[in-house]
Amino acid sequence: MESAGRAQDRVPRVDPYGFERPEDFDYAAYEEFASAYLVVLTRRAIKWSKLLKGRGRVQRSGTVKRYIRKGIPLEHRARVWMGVSGAQAQMDQNPGYYQRLLQGEHNDRLEEAIRTDMNRTFPDNIKFRKSADPCLQKTLYNVLLAYGRHNQGVGYCQGMNFIAGYLILVTKSEEESFWLLDALVGRILPDYYSPAMLGLKTDQEVLGELVRTRLPAVAALMDGHGVLWPLVVSRWFICLFVDILPVETVLRIWDCLFNEGSKIIFRVALTLLKQHQAFILEGTSVVDICERFKAITRGSFVTECHTFMQKVFSEPGSLSMATISRLRASCRARLLAQG
């Protein structure tokens, strides 16, 4: 108990991204993890600095992929995300486009929808509070407004506020956040945020099919209690694990998401389910199963992001994009047939 108290004195109450630690935060366990992770980060930072020295735009390669899977240091994260996602190329090819979007014609419905979600976005983050100087709510509003005008088929959808918020915290740049949001919503996660959300619904069904073949006991439990996958995992997909997994773990997942695409979401989901399969199988009702799905996104397994990401690439086994594409085609057809 004493060491926990001392850890609470040493570990800042607000994390490096501006999030306040929750009431039940395990300071002692975090301090133990952070001291070991700092060694890893220092080693990776030296390697990344050597890799990036004298380079212009970061481009995909076998070496870059290997480095990204081991984590991008925060000081290089924005540059690497911008390079591997294609966002930098888009920004370079469209100078002044973001500013023109901000000066576009008014759309009361779009503006009101975004404004409504401002205070709901990260109330536990000191940088998004109205009292903050500068307050990131204005930056967030601008990014979402510009994106709504840029992609009128999507406009604004709940969940995009959390994603744009993280992009702003990492890049500290409105324009870069806009182009990264475009990479995610427009290319990496097609149809997740469109009004019908067909891509999102499809991928939730794809996860169900993957669980059916790889973790059949979990699938049987879900079927037995009539629990539909969207009930327990929709926020994993919509928010890309923001506000679900710890911040640093989410950013490590996003490192791979920008480089390797949406396949990483299935890897993360399968890793969580496989690691906690016995715990999930003890579920006795719909409510109990839902609570267990929340519980598996907390604790040391997900906080220790470096070992977690190693598991993400080993535990689910082989998972090719061809497999995902095949399952997406069949699940999408089934959803369309259902109307």
Image: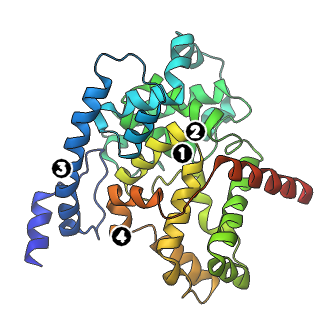
Q: Nearer the viewer, residue 111 or 169?
A: 169
How packed mark 4 is, by other alpha carbons closer than 10 Å (few <14, some 14-19, many 20 or more), is some
Q: Closer to the N terminus: mark 3 or mark 1?
A: 3
Please state, as top left, top right, bottom left or bottom right, where the C terminus lies in the image.
Answer: bottom right
Residue 31 position in % (x across, y down)? 18, 61
How packed mark 3 is, by other alpha carbons closer than 10 Å (few <14, some 14-19, many 20 or more), is few
Residue 294 position in % (x across, y down)? 49, 71
Residue pointed to by mark 3: 39
Q: Closer to the N terminus: mark 2 or mark 4?
A: 2
Secondary structure of the residue carrying tag 1 is helix
Alpha carbon separation for disc pair 2 and 3: 41 Å
Residue pointed to by mark 2: 114
Residue pointed to by mark 4: 299
Q: Closer to the N terminus: mark 3 or mark 4?
A: 3
Secondary structure of the residue carrying tag 3 is helix
Alpha carbon separation for disc pair 4 and 1: 29 Å
Q: Nearer the viewer, mark 4 or mark 1?
A: 4
Q: Is residue 267 visible?
A: yes
Q: Closer to the N terminus: mark 4 or mark 1?
A: 1
Residue pointed to by mark 1: 117
Q: Are marks 2 and 1 in contact (CB under 8 Å)?
A: yes
Q: Closer to the N terminus: mark 2 or mark 3?
A: 3
